[in-house]
Amino acid sequence: MRILVLGGYGFIGSAVVARLSAEGHEIVGAGRRTGRASRRRPDLRWIKINIANARSPERWLKHLEGIDAVVNCAGVLQDTPRDSTRRVHVEGTIALFSACVKKGIRRVVHISTVGVGPDKDTSFARTKFAAEQALKKLDLDWIILRPSLVFGRSIYGGMALLRALAVSPFVLPLARESATFWPVQVTDLASAVSFFLRPDAPSHRVFEIAGPERLTLRRIIGAYRRWFGFAPGEIIRLPLIGAKILAWLGDVGSWLGWRPPFRTTSLRQLSQSLMSEPDLWTKVTGINPMPLETALRLEPASAQELWFARLYLLKPIIIGVLSLFWIVDGVIGLGPGRTILVDLSREVGFGVWSTLAAVASGVLQVGLGIGIAIRATSRVALTASLLAALAYVGAGGLMRLGLWLDPLGSLLKMFPIIILTIVAIAIFDDR
């Protein structure tokens, strides 16, 4: 079959694409950022489309030529200036499914999630449910899959955060550590998608996709800690106010274009993990899902996983430190340190342009700091700040050799900033 996989480069989508292509299906991947995906899998066809903007069936019709089935793996966690849960989960998704009706494409597999409903306290859960209800009204052979916590070797989002907590050196600060999940291997979920794409598979059904064990958040992190080879760590339960503050900081990051895994929606969804029929899907498909610890034993942790886990929580700290450094340095140069900066500019040869050079330097630094903080401009701003730091060290050190002996280390302090910037660029990509 020729299958359109929406969100085919994401954590779940890439596993689905890998499984279906290995079975001989012709895959068409779709999403709003397909550049890297097309380089990783040049053997597949990729369509660049933003589902949030494709909210009419006509926008999808040309992309459905020759398509036999559709798998929807797309989704966003929370509303931000860049993401809209309603546009992605409801309007864009139903436009795609309505286009399938017009094109005569019968088989649709829709990846939803556990804990959805019309009265839930997150837009994520309400819009996911609204999409399900709208899909059920269409004349399609639809299947809705509601996976629990999905894990795998290649991780993203919440599971990446759990791995990072597992390697915490002293304590494991957790919120709602007693929340329970049925962790399911992403390859098992991909197998379920493959099964329900078969022409003889059941349709018009909703299945909860769960692993074979119900585990608390504490036990899941403990399993990953053993996987990494660490002794059991002391767990300190974060007060709810502490968890809410961290979630709020995650919300702030999301409004700047980042996608932190722990946000207000994440905190609320922790209590939405219960399942009514966790083993029904295994009876229908015959798939024997793999327990978490079995999967971990089959793929021992490597140094790469350990590095990733340790750097995961450091990444936002590094970005934040670099952003604040440039902003504060620029503000000081424009304010209390302006006279000193003007004198220094005059000494290194700017002459009558010294005041303008000092102001321009301060504005540039503040601009670099703001650019680093915003996800869309961060990589460019990091690169520019690296060049600015190198230029500052080179020009300042040559024009005024005494700066090397400055007791406040005006030049020497740039070297750790340069190294930290290189690290930030190296670990910039989310997936």
Image (cartoon, rainbow, N blue to C red):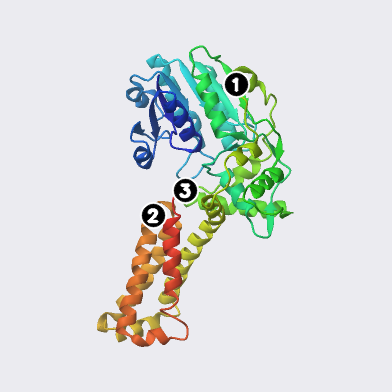
Q: In which quarter of the image is residue 238?
A: bottom right
Q: Is residue 403 left or right of residue 234?
A: left
Label 1–label 2 contact, CB within 8 A: no
Task: Tell me what residue is drawn at x 61 percent, y 41 percent.
Answer: 296
Marks 2 and 3, how far apart at CA: 15 Å
Q: Name the residue under label 1.
A: 206
Mark 1 / mark 3, whichever is N-terminal: 1
Q: Is residue 360 visible?
A: no
Mark nearest the camera among 1 and 2 is: 1
Q: Residues within 10 Å of mark 1 (few under 14, many from 20)?
A: some
Q: Is residue 337 visible?
A: yes
Which residue type does callout 1 highlight?
Val
Q: Name the residue under label 2.
A: 377
**Image quarter (top left, top right, bottom left or bottom right) of the N terminus:** top left
Say what secondary structure mark 2 lies in: helix
Residue 172 vertical placement versus 87 (above, below): below
Quadrant assignment, res 338: bottom left
> Which secondary structure lies at badge 1?
strand
Which residue in the rendered view is the most extreme toward the top?
Answer: 200
Q: Nearer the viewer, residue 295 or 429?
A: 295
Q: According to the image, label 3 marks what residue?
A: 430
Q: Which residue is drawn at 44% across and 55% down?
A: 374
